[in-house]
Image: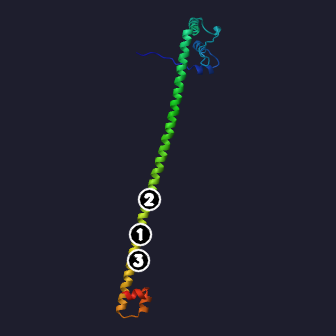
Amino acid sequence: LTHDCIIIQIPSLKKKQNKTDELEKLMDIFDLAKRHQIEYDEKGLSKEYFPLLRRLRKAIEEEEVKGIMDVEDEIIESFKQKETEIEKALEIAEQERKRAEEEKKRAEEKEKLLEEKEKLLEKERIRAEEERKRVEDSKQKIIELAKLLKELNLPIQVIMNKTGLSEQEIEKI
C-alpha cells in the first residue's frame, strides 16, 4: 500500500508573513509554543474548517484528553532527556576512545624509542668490544715486537722507546 503524504513544517509557516493559501491559514493556528491551545481568527478561515476547529477545541477542553496530552508531553520530554543523556554518554565515550588512542600512540612511541636505545646500546657494546679487541691485538703485537727486539739483544732502553713498554714488562717477556 502506498499513501500520499504531505509534510508541513509549521515553524517555516510562521516566518512567512502573507498567508495566501487556505492550508497555510489553517496550519497557522497550530502554534507549537502554546501546547494544548488553539488560537485562530474566524474571519481569515473558510467555514469548512470550523467543524474541525470546534472538534479540536472540544478535545482540548475535555479533562481526560488533556490528561492524556499532558502524559504524552511528559513522555516526549523524558525521551528528549534520555536522548540528551545518550548523546552526552556517546560524547564522553568518544573522548575516552580518543584519549585511549593517544595513550596507545604515546606508548608505541616510547616503545620505539626504547627499541632504538637498545639498538644504539647494542651497537655501542659491539663497538666497545671491537675496540677492546683492537687494543688487545695491538698490545699483543707490541709484546711480540718487544720479544723480537729482546731476542736481537737490543738494550732495554731502546726496546722501551720503540714499544712504550715499561722495564718490568720487557723483563717478563
Residue drawn at (39%, 76%) of the image = 134
Which mark is on residue 53? Answer: none
Q: Residues within 10 Å of mark 3 (few under 14, many from 20)?
A: few
Q: Earlier in the sequence, mark 2 or mark 1?
A: 2
Q: Residues within 10 Å of mark 2 (few under 14, many from 20)?
A: few
Image quadrant of residue 38? top right
> Which residue position holds label 1?
127
> Which residue position holds label 3?
135
- The Cα atoms of the two marked residues, 1 and 3, are separated by 12 Å
| Residue 117 to residue 171: above or below | above
> Which residue position holds label 2?
116
Q: Earlier in the sequence, mark 2 or mark 3?
A: 2
Tag 3 secondary structure:
helix
Q: Amino acid at mark 3?
A: Val
Q: Picture coordinates of residue 21 (x, y %)?
A: 59, 14
Q: Amino acid at mark 2?
A: Glu
- The Cα atoms of the two marked residues, 2 and 3, are separated by 28 Å
